[in-house]
Amino acid sequence: MKSSIYGISFFFLFCIFPLVSGQLASNQSNTMITVSHQLANSSWNVEKEQNPCLWEGVTCNAPHNDSILSLSLSGFGLSNSSFLPLLCQINSLQSLDFSSNLFNSIPVEFFNSCGEIDGLKSLNFSKNMLVGSLPTFQKFVGLESLDLSFNSLSGSIDSQLNGLSALKSLNLSFNYFTGSVPSRLGKSRVLEQLELSMNRFTGEIASEIGEHGNLIKIDLSGNHLNGIIPESFVNLTKLETLILSSNQLHGAIPAGLLGITTLQRFSANQNNFVDLPSTNPSMSLKILDLSYNKITGRILPQLLLGSNLQTVDLSYNMLTGPIPVTISSSLVRLRLGSNYLRGPIPSTSFVSLPNLTYLELDNNSFTGTLPPQIGSNPKLALLNLAQNKLNGTLPDELLNLTQLEVLKLQLNKLSGEIPNQIGRLNMLSVLNISWNSLKGIIPPSISNCGKLINLNLQNNGLTGLIPDAIGNLKFLLELQLGENKLHGRIPDMPQKLQISLNLSFNNFDGPIPKTLSGLNDLEVLDLSNNSFSGTVPDFLVSLSSLSQLVLSNNQLYGVLPQFKPHVSVDINGNLQLHRPKDNPPVLSKKGKPVGVTIVITFAAAVLAVVVVAVVFLLISRRLSKVNEEQLQSLEVLSPPRVIQGNMLTANGVHRSNIDFTKAMEAVASPANIVLKTRFSTYYKAMMPSGASYYVKKLNWSDKIFQLGSRDKFEQEIEALGKLSNSNIMIPLAYVLTVDSAYLFYEFAPKGTLYDILHGSLKSSLDWASRYSIAVGVAQGLAFLHGCTSSPILLIDLSSRSIVLKSLKEPQVGDIELCKVIDPSKSNGSLSTVAGSVGYIPPEYAYTMRVTMAGNVYSFGVVLLELLTGKAAVSEGTELAKWVLSNSVRPNKLDHVLDFSISRTSLVVRNQMLAVLKVALACVSVTPESRPKMKSVLRMILNISTRDIPNPRGYSKRLLQNRKQTHQLLLV
């Protein structure tokens, strides 16, 4: 019995023993304690936890826990690297991760000591501040993975990697390496991943890379490589991903490359290739991107037949001939736009493709009718056949595409009528069939397309009335009905119209209707070239977001009401309509000017009427309460009554300067408006101390309070007030009144970037200043996107929302709006398309979501403004589209640059072209192909400033903020 008890006891001891933590070897424990004293990291504290195996980022060999296998100090914010050699005393290490810190160097002793650890397999120093040349790895015979990406390493790569005989993964992307792409890559013959993207490598791709037969992934994108793709790449029988985008490669693509049986992705867009591969793609190929090249000839039938093909992008080339008659049923996205393809669209090409979601054949020379078979693709969400030579009617089969969100058929020769049952396409957000020859009426059923955001029927032959039900399109932001033959009553319009309402070149007559009075979000209203008569109604002045009003060539008369200074009003061609300061056009019965006496008499009579009217109004003001609209028309406003005012800044100067009462007096006068953006109005307020501040009124604040979200508003604003970044407009204080919110900021004496670029100071903005502005704005956006709690996304990024403290110090404004306008929707979804015309990314029209990729697009447009000197929209053309169309022909790239700047020196020209390359990546049509904002910042910083004329002012600030800049690049 006793022996049984002993047996049971030993059994339990045996079972329990593995659960008891072992003792870490004393030498390793002592090393960790020594290192912890140098790190001063709260999670590495022997007083709180004696066992280093339980410290953050430490992995030991479970269950014994007597040796350390890996250390991850990623994101610890470390800048002093002197402790690194100490860690090499832990000879059991297999992995070291020091990514996302602030190291600018690695001690030589680290390489000497850690190179002796036979079991060390992974070393990661990515996302630091490392400078200088690539370290030499003489030992490290067991190292399998080396990641030094996202640093500032430079120089050429020669023999530094020769000792890495076991290397499987090498990532040196996003650095400043120059010279040739390393060919031998040390003694390794087991290399699987080679990532060298976004550097400055030049010359040809060495054919020796093709000797590394185990390669699975090669990424050489974003360099300055030229020459051809080595034929030896065909021998890489395990290759799955090959990315060569954004280089200067040319020639033909090796015949057998797409035939590699394991190849899943081949991206070589933005190069100078001239021929398509002639062999059948492998059955594994999923993504083929050869857009933005110089590829000529026909599309070979076998190229679109891969059984696993998902995306094929051959857009922006010089392809000719027809579309192949047979296409893989696995295709999800097919982009063939902006080529020279011709002939009819084959009816057999697009029959029952069950996965086809995006089809883009725009800007070609296709003829014939629109094949009804396109209607047999149940998942089709985007169909773009614009700018071809298609004729005939719209087939009824199109109405079967019940998942269709974007339909673009503009600039063709389509005829007939808009199908009566167009409302069956109730998922549509964009419908553009402008510039065709359509007849008949606008079908009332179009009101069933309840998700429409953009409706463009311009330049057809449409007749009849605008259907009353058009007002039911509650999400509609742009309505283009110009250049038709519409007439009759103008019905109530959708209240959320924002971008534009165009009724020009029709047959409307009578007074400008009151049905337009509720369009408070509308920016552009075009009523030109009709037969409108009567006076210009005062309610147009009250359209708070209006920036452009076109009334030309009508029969209007009288005195134009006084619009705000920022509103552009065109009244040309209305002979009896004049502006307030003009002399009224008085003609005799024969059409000749009357005598001076009559003019004086008439003027005196007018003056008398004005005097009587003013006296009457003054008396009326004393005797009765004048409503707010009347007060605004007289520009005599009472200061808003402050119900709450809070300081956000701890800066004593600002706290003593800001006077809430004085600020409210300033916002009472429209004369103090200095800036009006899509969502906000900025006033200049002079304080008693003499200091000036921006006071921003949120135009939609009444809606915030109606939602009962004042507490949320205050929380968000106070959180934003704690942010710290020199390139962001940080609120210093805020005031709440009964129906509005006012935010206070430092005043920027240079105004907005829009004013500087497109106003009178344009000539003073040299390339050094433009480059500095680009870096500053990129830094601000990268900071916002990298906020630790959640990214801060901008609803309206444009050159108007960027203010300049100096010609080299930009600040991004309106950062509050994403969380303030609709705080109940933290996922970035909006009830209105965000942004200003020309800056809105294509996908916003049908996704209704603000995204980081969308912000990158808007920033790309700002870059294009800096490079070209042109506005985001000029003469009806969006700048991004214009530059993209020119970028297809590399010899035209010089032509898009602002010649007054690019001609100053060859260095400046080359730098501008380098920034243009970044801008083109930002305004890519597809959001997934745009770089992240931190990558954009690094790409711009990669462009050397040492030869920029007079860069000292910015360089000094860049050095001062270097730590801040690199912190942005860590995450």
Image (spheres, rainbow, N blue to C red):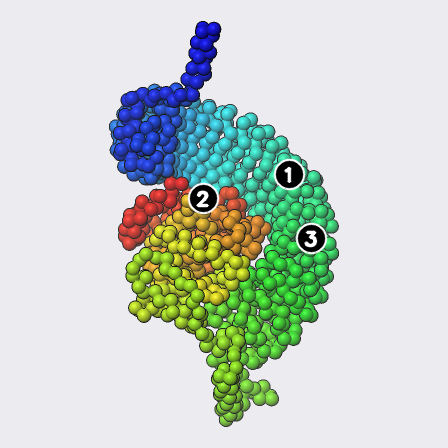
931 or 82: nearer the viewer: 82
Whether residue 4 is visible, yes or no, is yes
Q: Report, in whole angstroms, how far the alpha carbon at label 1 lies from the one at label 2.
A: 28 Å
Q: Which residue: 66% across, 60% down?
A: 472
Q: Where 380 falls versus 479 (above or below)?
A: above
Q: Report, in whole angstroms, how far the alpha carbon at label 3 lies from the one at label 2.
A: 41 Å
90 or 926: nearer the viewer: 90
**Where does label 3 land, which residue?**
391
**Where does label 2 land, which residue?**
932
Amino acid found under the numbered disc labelled 3:
Asn
- Looking at marks 1 and 2 on the same chain, the residue that comes earlier in the sequence is marked by 1
Q: Residues within 10 Å of mark 1 (few under 14, many from 20)?
A: some
Task: Give x and y (percent) for residue 161.
Answer: 34, 27
Do tag 3 and tag 1 residues touch (Cβ < 8 Å)?
no
* Residue 157 placement, left or right of 367: left
Q: Secondary structure at mark 1?
A: loop
**Where does label 1 land, which residue?**
355
Q: Which residue: 30% across, 64% down?
A: 656
Count of marks placed on residues: 3
* Residue 505 placement, left or right of 165: right
